[in-house]
Amino acid sequence: MMLKAGETVLFERTFTKEDVEIFTKVSNDEGEHHLVPDELGRLVVHGLLTATIPSKVGGDHSVLARTMNFEFLRPVFTGDTIFCEVLIEHYGKREDGRFAIKASFRCRNQSGKEVLLGNFAGIILKEKEESAGQ
């Protein structure tokens, strides 16, 4: 599906202990808060792992990111469900025929508290079939 300026895309994800363990191995970020559960048995989810939620729109639409900005507002824990709203602020054809995208996002936990804000910009590597000729 082709994106449009002004459109809001919604995603959600619940983070698991396994997600944190895998990301710890991949990132080599072995901060104690990612390894040792708190008094409620939860691990703190890596900030960059949390940031994969808004990047899903990029993966779904073959975006090559040029810039990504994140503001981490509060920790995310294993078991938390994060709801993300991505607002497509700009989506248009460039002079070279590729499409440019700019978007901002807001992520909230299951209690409605903001955990992550930010924005990204990039180009679409391969536009979806539906947009051919536009």
Image (cartoon, rainbow, N blue to C red):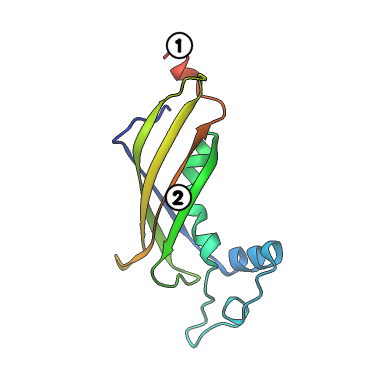
> Is 32 on the left or on the right of 71, as rendered?
right
Mark 2 surroundings: few (<14), some (14-19) or many (≥20) residues within 10 A: many
Mark 1 surroundings: few (<14), some (14-19) or many (≥20) residues within 10 A: few
Q: Residue furthest top?
A: 133
Count of marks, rendered view:
2
Q: Position of residue 23 (x, y in %)?
A: 64, 63
- Secondary structure type for disc 2: helix
Residue displayed at 71% across by 66% down:
25
> Is 38 on the left or on the right of 18, as rendered?
left
Task: Name the residue carrying label 2.
Answer: 54
- Secondary structure type for disc 1: loop
Residue type (three-letter) at the residue carrying disc 1: Gly
Q: Which quadrant holds residue 90? A: top left
Sooner in the amino-acid sequence: mark 2 or mark 1? 2
Q: Position of residue 28 (x, y in %)?
A: 70, 68
In this rendering, is residue 87 above or below 18? above
